[in-house]
Amino acid sequence: MRAHENAHPAATARQCARSVLMVRPAMFYANPETHPTNAFQNVVAASAADVLSVARAEFEAAAATLADAGVKVLVLDAQPGAETPDALFPNNWFSTHEDGRLVLYPMCTANRRRERRPEALIALAAARRFQITETIDLTGLEERGLYVEGTGSLVLDREARIAYAALSPRTHAEAVEIACRELGYEPVAFHAHDSAGREIYHTNVLMSVGPTLAVLASGLVQPGADLRRVFDALEQTNKTLLDLSASQVAEFAGNVLFLDSGASAPVVALSRRAWKSLTRAQRQLLEQHARPVLCAVETIEHVGGGGIRCMLAEIFLPPAGT
């Protein structure tokens, strides 16, 4: 397996970001536009104000926990009154890359498209002395009904230039191919379903790739050619496998992110709920490859249907002046 030949010549191979962007929510509730494709969302009886208050407290605590672990956290406030209940999941609308490229992605639903604020992101990057050399805008694919929702849809092995993609109503094969062609990545597309037979809406719900470890619920991947394709890619890139069950995926154990804390070994951000679902052997395996950083985001997970990984948009941009 090899990456596309048009890989950007300035690209380098670093799997873990040193910095992440988090978006502080201005509102938060189970998004009715995304609920048909996200079985992890739940409508709750509490008032919207109370749910937002708890979600904001979880957000602030998670940001502080990551910063205490050595991760550089950038915070952007969501726009008040924009009716973007999923704004605190910014990894779906953009990705950044070490050669300075910013990629904007096509989103499935109208209210999620309103989350895209490239001007605010560019201003924040400039203020924090990051360099953006080029913007790749894939949002025009929405006019053709083609979607690939950032690093929710694409789990990137940046070192090997492989993009894993679980196909779904939010992750279309043609959009994956187009994104990978722009990025110079080899797509590894597959089908995956939960225990009720529903398509997994985002790849990062059941999969994460670190420098030496891959987290995957292999039992949810369609058996046969699809599963062989994923296993072959992981084997060729020398990844140790931490295999999850369907019930652990339901506890957000697949929704984790490996990050650079400035120490010799990476950290892995995961939720308290996810950690509790792991067996002792799985915890030990994870700790052999990264230091766990636990974030308590139970309300965000339960109501929003996204976990701590969804809350983190990696910043791989080079420093200004380089």
Image: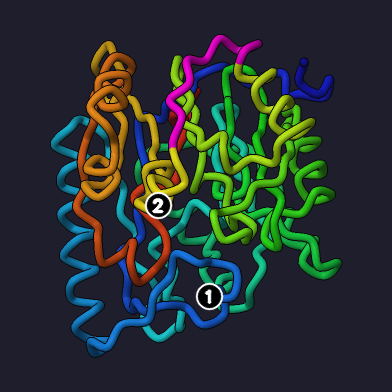
255 with respect to 49 (left or right): right
The residue at the point 55 percent across, 65 percent down is 116
Q: Work out whether residue 65 or residue 51 is closer to the camera in this orientation and state it.
A: 51
241 with respect to 266 (left or right): right
Magenta stretch bounds: 235-244
Q: Is residue 243 magenta?
A: yes
The residue at the point 31 percent across, 26 percent down is 282
Residue 57 position, x and y percent, is 16, 65
> Quick one: label 1, few (<14), some, or many (20+) residues within 10 Å?
some
Q: Is residue 158 magenta?
A: no
The numbered mark, 2 or 1, whose residue comes first in the sequence reads 1
**Label 2 secondary element:** helix
53 with respect to 87 (left or right): left
> Quick one: label 2, few (<14), some, or many (20+) residues within 10 Å?
some
- The answer to whether residue 126 shows anywhere in this view is no
The residue at the point 84 percent across, 49 percent down is 174
Residue 76 position, x and y percent, is 34, 59
Residue 216 position, x and y percent, is 50, 33
The residue at the point 54 percent across, 27 percent down is 98
**Label 1 secondary element:** helix
Vertical position of residue 63 compared to residue 16: above or below? below
Vertical position of residue 296 compared to residue 79: above or below? above
Residue 15 position, x and y percent, is 48, 23
What is the CA distance from the residue labelled 2 to the residue labelled 1?
A: 31 Å
Kind of residue sitting beneath label 2: Leu
Q: Which residue is mark 2?
A: 124
- Nearer the observer: mark 2 or 1; the answer is 1
- Give the quarter of the figure containing the N terminus: top right
Q: Which residue is mark 1?
A: 35
Kind of residue sitting beneath label 1: His
